[in-house]
Amino acid sequence: MTLSLQPTMREKNRYLVIEVLGQQQSLELLSKAIKASFGSLFGSMETAKANIKILPDSFRSEGRRGIIKVVRHALDPLKASLCLVDSMQVRSLFASGTLKKAKAYLEGKHATANGSSNDGI
């Protein structure tokens, strides 16, 4: 018998779509740079609580845009730490509560503020 958590007790995740500017970097180097920046700004305890994960299947062949999964309370600190990454320039493009919406933004199928899509129709 497996015990599962109630939905109200689970950690809520947010998904941040990012873009890497400049030279193309490997995912391992990107992950280490982001976690090091977050750790230097907020410490190792907050880094562990943030549970930062770069979703490797979200990065396309060009490797410029991708999705980072983070715990809800650490979204704003993660955005702040992206400004302080030393080895590369990383900027946040879009934050979402669902992976489906983040992937839609990544593919260019996101909706604008008034609810209409940006596909030109």
Image (cartoon, rainbow, N blue to C red):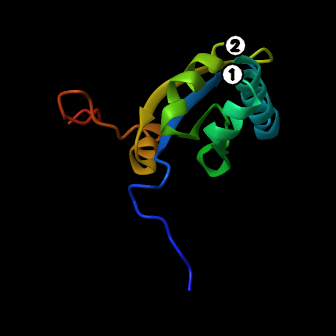
Tell me residue 90's x, y (percent): 64, 21
SS assignment at label 1: helix
Q: CA distance from mark 1 to mark 2?
A: 12 Å
Tell me residue 6's x, y (percent): 42, 64
Q: Residue at x 46, y 49 (%)?
A: 99
SS assignment at label 2: loop
Kindly indicate the quadrant of the structure image that contains residue 69. Answer: top right
Residue sitting nearer the eye, 64 or 55: 55
Quadrant (top left/top right/bottom left/bottom right) for the C terminus:
top left
Q: Amino acid at mark 2?
A: Leu
Q: Residue at x 65, y 43 (%)?
A: 53
Kindly indicate the quadrant of the structure image that contains residue 26. Answer: top right
Tell me residue 95's x, y (percent): 44, 32
- Residue at mark 1: 42
Disc assigned to residue 84: 2
Q: Is residue 46 above or below residue 103?
A: above
Residue 26 appears in the picture as rendered = yes
Q: Residue at x 25, y 36 (%)?
A: 117
> Callout 1: few (<14), some (14-19), or many (20+) C-alpha neighbours within 10 Å?
some
Residue 24 appears in the picture as rendered = no
Q: Is residue 43 above or below residue 28?
A: above
Q: Amino acid at mark 1?
A: Phe
Q: Residue at x 56, y 86 (%)?
A: 1
